[in-house]
Structures are given as structure tokens and as C-alpha cells.
Amino acid sequence: YANVLSMKDLSSGEVMNFIREAQQFKAGKQIELTRPVYAANLFFENSTRTHTSFEMAERKLGLNVVNFDPAHSSVNKGETMADTLKTLQAIGVDVVAMRDKHNEYYQELVDDRNIHVGIANGGDGSGEHPSQSLLDMMTIYEEFGFFEGLKVAIVGDLAHSRVARSNMEVLNKLGARVYFGGPKKWFDDRFQAFGTWMPVDDLVDEMDVMMFLRVQHERLDSKENANFTAAGYNAEFGLTPEREARMQEHAIIMHPAPVNRGVEIADELVECDRSRIFTQMQNGVFVRMAVMASLLRYKGLVEED
Ligand code: CP
């Protein structure tokens, strides 16, 4: 791929190809590069997992990682994102992973005919988070071996979640049955075509996957934050020990993290037996290897496997 930007661009077959290659990387597959290759990670919005796992993926593929620190970059002197990319391209960067708070920040970059670096979208505002979605799909596939008919609930701060938007789209394509939960005010028109809303007390009895989303306090207004209590949210919408005990034996818990412990999920359940939260993070490295490898192949930088 020239770029990996949105799950809307990927067919179910293409998603499965990413999952299968990520599984091969997890099993130890290596690729050979045609020349030294350089990557940079431009995270204009905070990140721990996505940033570090893209960097780990790049290093595992044998790429040279060029440090880019937004806080000390010339973006703070008013340089545009496009000129920043052209600068990195001029000094020899081949591929980048990026995150920004603006939805579809990447569009002006891919429309600019002078930008040729391959872009992996590491999250655009409340738009999409394709590499998170691919690692979520890999984790579900590893667990069940299929998607058709699986019942997956996406529960929590739907309104602000790029993970929800990427995942509802791809889960539908893969044949899973999507449900939603959490505060009903966050279940708006954008979600209704993809699945139905149910109270969390009903979801826990029926679902194969309970996927919780972080409450994004940084995107809530001051009144919403003032009215919020961790205990109140957890009791009404979150995973409590009582709800976890009612889940089917084979059912799993997921969360893209960071987790607000005691809010979306009771503290003691974050690392319980059915939690796959840290498996998701581990799989993130291998999925991002597959994403970066696809950008490198498009540029002819991988020796034929
Ligand atoms: N899941 C996720 O995107 O985490 P970070 O914000 O830490 O990258």
C-alpha cells in the first residue's frame, strides 16, 4: 500500500492478509530490505502504545529510526505538517507513522504530489485508528479462529472513539455481530447502521467479546467532566466483578488502553484471566510490522519473500 490510513480502504481479504502476516512476524518471520531504510514517527498527539510499538516494529524490520520530537520541532515556529514531511523526505526518510488531533489530517498530505513518503496513520482525532483496529482483529482471530457470527460489544465513550469507528466498520465486513453499550447519549446516528445498543447488564451475558473504551476526559466539556464520578460510571456502564462473573466461560475482555482503572473496568479485572489487554499491546508490534512492510513493498524496498 502507498499509505495505510483508514479501515474503510481495506476489504475483509486485505484485513485477513494483514492478520496472517502479523502472525508470521509473531512466529519469527524476517524480511530482507533492498537498501538501508529510514523511518520517523510523528506523534502530534500523546501516545505510549502506538508510538513505541511502531518504533519497535520498525526496529524489528531492520529500519533505521530517525528521532522526531514534535515539542521541539519547527512545527512550533509555524511550519506546516506538509513542509515537515517534505523536509524529512528530503533528508532521506522513506516511511512515517503519524498521529494528529485533527480528523483526516492525512488527506492534504496524500493529495500533495510532492510527498512520496509512505504514511501509516497512528490515529486521527476522533476519526480512525487503523493499526489499533488491525491488532484488535488479530487478537480476536487468535482467540476464536473466525469472525463470522461472533458477538462483539463495543462499550463506552463511543462519541469520541476512533477505535469504535474503525472496529465497527471492520467487524461488520468480517461477519461479526456488533453491539454497543455505555451512556446512550454517546450512541448517535453514526453507530446505528452497524449494531444495536444494549444495557451492559444484558451484554455481559451474551457476548463473546466485551471491548471497553476509555472515557476520553480530554475531549469532554467541563460540565460533563464536573458531573463524572469513577464509581458512578463503573457501576452503571463498566465491568464490575459481578458482571465479569456472568460472562460466558470462553468470553474475553478487551480495551485499547490506556485504561482508566476503576472506571471502564474494575482495577482487579484489568489483568484477570479473560483479559486480553496486554496481548493486544503485544500483537500491536506484529501488526505494525505488517503495516510498515506493506508500505515498504509498495516502494520496492523489500526483497521478494
Ligand atoms: N491504544 C492507543 O492508541 O494507545 P496510545 O494512545 O498510548 O498510543
Image: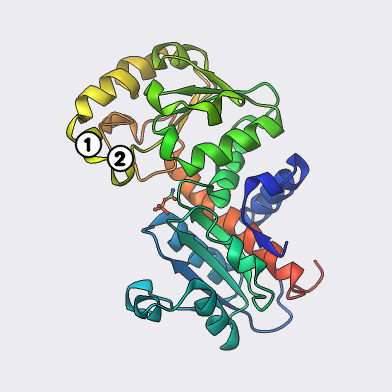
Left or right placement of residue 235 versus residue 94 in this view: left
**Distance from the alpha carbon under mark 1 to that under mark 2:** 6 Å
Pointer 1 or 2: first along the chain: 2
- At horizontal 28% and vertical 28% (from top left) the residue drawn is 266
- On the image, the x and y values in percent for residue 75 come to 40, 76
User: Mark 2: which secondary structure?
Assistant: loop
The C terminus lies in which quarter of the figure? bottom right
Image quadrant holding the N terminus, namely bottom right
Percent x, y of residue 188: 48, 27
Colour theme:
rainbow
Q: Which one is in front, 53 or 221?
A: 221
Tell me the residue at 64%/54% (across/down): 27
Q: Which mark is residue 225?
A: 1
Which is nearer the eye, 55 or 86? 86
* Residue 242 in the image: above or below residue 194: above
The three-letter amino acid code for the residue at tag 2 is: Leu
- Residue 29 visible within the image: no
Comparing 172 with 275, the one in front is 172
Tell me where residue 167 appears, x and y as whole percent: 57, 37
Q: Secondary structure at mark 1?
A: helix
Q: What label does residue 220 carry, if any?
A: 2
Can I make out residue 227 in this image? yes
Q: Which mark is residue 213?
A: none
Q: Is residue 230 rendered to the left or right of residue 242? A: left
Q: Residues within 10 Å of mark 2 (few under 14, many from 20)?
A: some
